[in-house]
């Protein structure tokens, strides 16, 4: 596979990851990330030549989409953290009542 093909595949995988994050399909997101990581390891270092500007455009798109994925993941992390906090408080209250 050429560098360009691999970069375009990484972009497509990143777009799919963003879609999965928007749908809150976290298992799918993790699977796509594993595949993408493998491709990233294969792609770099790039053989930069006359295609460097094309590569920069694709890489910029990958970074932009990835930042959106990260933002959605951080939102979900905070949501889960809050739910866990509420659960732990409820558990402590229930435990206190059962001790009496």
Image (cartoon, rainbow, N blue to C red):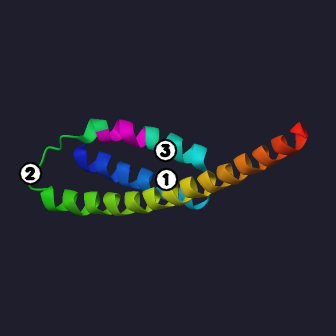
Q: Is residue 20 visible?
A: no
Foreground disc of the pair 2, 3 = 3
Q: Secondary structure at mark 2?
A: loop
Which residue lies under the disc numbered 1? 17
Q: Are marks 2 and 1 in contact (CB under 8 Å)?
A: no
Q: Is residue 80 left or right of residue 67?
A: right
Which residue lies under the disc numbered 2? 49
Per the image, is 53 magenta? Answer: no
Q: Position of residue 24 (x, y in %)?
A: 61, 56
Residue lying farthest front?
100
First reached walking from the N terminus: tag 2 or tag 1: 1
Q: In the depicted view, which residue is nearer to us: 62 or 83?
A: 83
First reached walking from the N terminus: tag 2 or tag 3: 3
Which residue lies under the disc numbered 3? 32
Q: Is residue 10 visible?
A: yes
Q: Is residue 22 left or right of residue 62?
A: right
**Quarter of the rendering containing residue 92:** top right
First reached walking from the N terminus: tag 3 or tag 1: 1
Q: Are marks 3 and 1 in contact (CB under 8 Å)?
A: yes
Per the image, is 38 magenta? Answer: yes
Q: Alpha-carbon distance for marks 3 and 1?
A: 6 Å
Q: Are marks 2 and 3 in contact (CB under 8 Å)?
A: no
Q: Alpha-carbon distance for marks 2 and 3?
A: 29 Å
Q: Position of residue 23 (x, y in %)?
A: 61, 59
Residue lying farthest left?
49
Foreground disc of the pair 2, 1 = 1
């Amino acid at each position: 596979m050429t560098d360009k093909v691999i970069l375009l595949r990484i972009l497509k995988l990143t777009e799919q990851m963003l879609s999965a994050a928007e749908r809150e399909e976290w298992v799918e997101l993790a699977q796509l990330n594993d595949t993408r990581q493998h491709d990233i390891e294969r792609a770099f270092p790039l053989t930069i030549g006359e295609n460097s500007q094309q590569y920069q455009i694709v890489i910029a798109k990958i970074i932009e989409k990835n930042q959106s994925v990260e933002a959605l993941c951080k939102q979900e992390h905070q949501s889960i953290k809050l739910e866990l906090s509420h659960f732990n408080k409820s558990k402590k209250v229930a435990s206190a009542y059962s001790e009496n």
